[in-house]
Image (cartoon, rainbow, N blue to C red):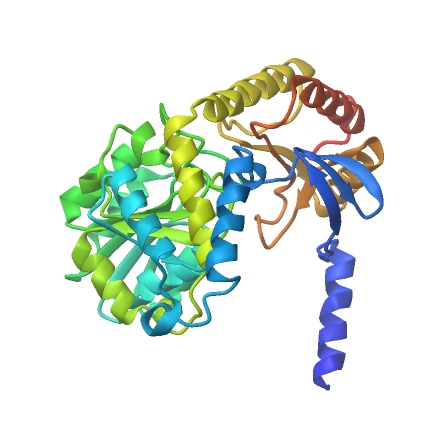
Amino acid sequence: MTLIERLRQRAAQRDAAHTRRHRRVQSQRSGMLTACDGKNLVNFSSNDYLGFAQHPEVIAAFRKSAERDGVGSAGSALVTGHFAAHRELELQAAALFGYEAALFTGSGYLANIGILQSLLDDASVCVQDKYNHACLLDGARFSGAALKRYPHADMVQAEARCAEANTDTLMLVSDGVFSMDGDAADLPALHAIAQRHRATLMIDDAHGVGVLGATGRGSVQAAGLHAADVPILVLPAGKALGGQGALILAQRDIIQHLLETARPYLFSTAPAPAMAAALSASLRLLESQTQHHAALLGNIHHFRRRAEAAGLPMLDSHTAIQPLMAGDNERALRWSEQLIDAGFWVSAIRPPTVPQGKSRLRITLTALHTEKQIDALVTALAEITGDGSDRG
């Protein structure tokens, strides 16, 4: 069988299982209104939780930097790609979140792969939640460390995996907010486990920063913890911060080690300085304009109240991620297409992103949604899910 024949066979298998992926094309957006594949839709799949991707101050900072520094960095950070905008963003992020130092990388995936490859080896043990993002799992596998996974959110088993580890280098790694279920990790428990077993705690807060905490500083703030309690914090910038890339926050010794040894950082062209400038603007907004965070929380609460009143099959999430369970793949796809026809963009999430039998609609709320849009979505969801006979 040739390569192309094998790929076509696998594509046919995905067709039969209703797991084929297709990209939709946006041609214009304004707030949460988007022109997509020739249709005008309200976007309930965006991770732009605070609306910063479209904020005038963020756009202006990007434009000003691009006019001064050009579009691309034209080199890796250790060659010619490290600009003043990068340095300023790293200093600003470290100060805002209370860490000694920060490192700006090209994506959350690259950040997590680089951290785990750089800090772990085949004599190390990495303990992770089974629902962690793929990049955390991949990073541990690529490092050669023994990867020990515990059932989702099971702190008894998390402790057991740490207790049985026979190594001087033990890392306990979790998402702050899990990207498909929308639930928050038990950070106080994870911190206590790490302390008891002398493990380094690492948290990826992609879906927590800008959402959780009294002032939107994320999962660490919401848990009442501090930088000393979470030695490595990763803040991917493509969600609430509205940009691209990721910030790694840690002690200065860890950051220095990563910038000298983390292969995805060493051998990648540095992110555009204009993106660093834009993210600096986003962090200023996060710190000074609390109305965006308040609007997001209001929309989450409003959606939860309306969804509960409508009897929708939602998971128990109180973050911006609101999963509506469909069960099988075909049903999730059908519901998503019915919502497109009704004027809403809500993506169907299927295996391997979620376990078999756990397909769903992944609804995301943002500060830019209106209550009228949320009410209309809930009405449409109630209509497509029917009286319960068509639910997973």
> In x, y percent, where is residue 353?
58, 51
Query: Compared with residue 5, is residue 338 higher up or lower down, i.e. above or below?
Result: above
Residue 318, horizontal then vertical, whole percent: 49, 26
Which x, y percent locates residue 86? 36, 56
* Snapshot quadrant of residue 252: bottom left
Q: Which is nearer the eye, 159 or 244?
A: 244
Observer-nearest of 209 and 123: 209
Q: Residue at x 77, y 31 (%)?
A: 390
Q: Is residue 255 left or right of residue 22?
A: left
The residue positioned 64% from the left and 34% from the top of the image is 325
Tell me if residue 131 can be seen: no
Can residue 300 be seen here? yes
Q: Quadrant of the N terminus?
A: bottom right
Foreground pick, 309 / 62? 62
Answer left or right for 287 relative to 391: left
Residue at image position (80%, 41%) is 337
Residue most toward the front? 68
**Percent coordinates x, y for residue 11 in the rendering:** 74, 67
Q: Tell how many labels.
A: 0
- Tell me: 359 left or right of 387: left
Q: Quadrant of residue 97?
A: top left
Query: Quarter of the image containing the C terminus?
Result: top right
